[in-house]
Amino acid sequence: MKILFVASEGLPFSKTGGLADVIEALPKSLVALGHEVSVLLPRYRKTKAVGISASSLTVPMGDGLRFPAIMEGGAIHGVYFYFVDDPEYFDRDQLYGVAGSDYPDNAERFAEFCGAAIEFCKHVWMPDVIHCHDWQSALVPVLLRTRYAVDPAVAELPVVFTIHNMGYHGAFPHTAMAKIGLPETLFTIDGMEFFGKVNFLKGGLLFSDFLTTVSPKYAEEIKTLQYGQGLDGVVRNRADRLTGILNGADYSAWSPERDKVIASRYSAKDLSGKLACKKDLLETFGLPKDVLGKPVIGIVSRFAGQKGFDLIEKIAPQLLAEDLVITALGAGDAKYEKLFREMAKAFPSKFSVKIAYDNIVAHKIEAGADMFLMPSLYEPCGLNQIYSLKYGTVPIVRATGGLDDTIDQFGSATGRGTGFKFQAYDGSALLESIRQAISVFRNEPAVWRRIQLNGMAQDFSWQASAKEYVKLYDAAWKEGIQKGQSSSNVLRAKSAKMTPVLPIGKGPHGR
């Protein structure tokens, strides 16, 4: 099967979060299963191309046209990478915005990207299925069922749409409809309107053939008022098309036995190299050598409210009164960057932060820390806790979404479990869980070793998840064939009216 991934970021070319890891790992797992996979990304400032596939595509944009090129990134592990090249839109300092603010033309930027993805299918490489990811690619199914509804080359192309995080909608002023050329008929409560704005994510939820999200628990959570981010009604109305498939880990990159950037490789059979990694981590963060025997907690994250940093802010005095060390890596909301800088300034021998996205430092934290902290308000899947397990770095997590799916609370009576979990989204619950972990680390080394080995024995590789995606691709492809076989009358009707075709039999699709 030929599968096209359309996403706004992907390693090894661009990254701000876990989406990039998935776009690197899942395609090559699909190739290993015998499928043909291409990935289409924007060509950002630091994205290097090796060739050109199309010097100019024609993409309608409001009252005008844009003419992006398609550049080639070459093949990596059997996956072919391509880039939408429009310097005016994508040759910028960052991917989505600067100084904590989104670029004001993000609607136009990613609308062009989605239109270019469809033109890519027509002129460069025609897939059997398109797999879109998050709001930045959500207009692909919308455009296929509206603007391209009378184009027999692509009208019935099936789309699988993955929600990596319901918290990011891609919501823009109503005026964006005209700027990007969406039909006004879509701006209704049953369409893409959302509290007076046009909502790209809602469009992806409504118009895609199948929906997935990145863990089974999160698939259930987003149907609820608490976690649905205002779109829970839309999700419930399409629940028969929604599947939760747990993200996997790419152990070729994230394993202490294979890691090329850590100070010393190690394994479950011989953990001695982890001490060398801990020394290297402390040195990397400029921490004193005499803290080597203390528990080191690692954080690698976007600095956002979703990640539970407001809880850390509430308990900061009590937390830093503990005999521990914290190393944090990430960037994001200015208030959390400021919080971490202030903590590092006030407690220079206990807390150190690097405000950056740095893959090498992330590996050093996973290998060198004793514990890994993820106190998220919600977490669709999470990857770092999965990486931590393999590195013998014990996770401390809140029991939500993929964190709850992947981490088992350790029980001293049974000797089972892989980490420490707390339920309530509360600072005292977080502090209690951290203190419990510290107590075991300090007072029960044999028990701590058992927790480490339990985690290192877990297998969250992509193979099983990739097979689940193939089942969805196959179902979407077969439906596409059936639609194509009986589409001539439908195409004539669409040509006459040019109105969007909403999912059939689902009832209201409003808020």
Image (cartoon, grey):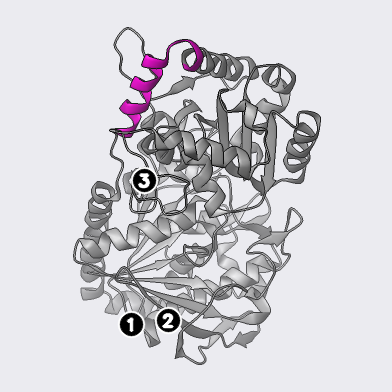
The mark nearer the N terminus, 3 or 2, is: 2
Q: Is residue 35 magenta?
A: no
Please identify the residue farthest to the top as the structure is shown.
413
Kindly report the distance in space between the C-alpha atoms of the residues bearing marks 3 and 1: 46 Å
Give the residues in magenta.
441-457
Kindly report the distance in space between the C-alpha atoms of the residues bearing marks 3 and 2: 36 Å
Q: Nearer the viewer, residue 139 or 23?
A: 23
Q: Mark 3 belongs to which amino acid?
A: Ser
Any part of residue 318 in sight: yes
Please name the residue that numbered disc 1 is placed on: 152
Which quarter of the picture shows residue 182?
Answer: bottom right
| Badge count | 3
Quadrant location of the N terminus in the rendered image = bottom left
Which quarter of the picture shows residue 32?
Answer: bottom left
Is 90 left, or right, of 368 in this rendering?
right
Q: Position of residue 148 (x, y in %)?
A: 43, 78
Residue at point 31%, 41% (across, down): 460
Q: Which marked residue is nearer to the observer: mark 3 or mark 1?
A: 3
Please name the residue that numbered disc 3 is placed on: 255
Any part of residue 183 in sight: no
Residue at point 69%, 62% (across, down): 174
Main secondary structure along the magenta-highlighted residues: helix
Q: Position of residue 87 (x, y in %)?
A: 64, 81
Please name the residue that numbered disc 2 is placed on: 120
Quadrant location of the C terminus in the rendered image = top right
Q: Mark 1 belongs to which amino acid?
A: Pro
Kindly report the distance in space between the C-alpha atoms of the residues bearing marks 2 and 1: 15 Å
Q: Mark 2 belongs to which amino acid?
A: Phe
Q: Nearer the viewer, residue 359 or 72?
A: 359
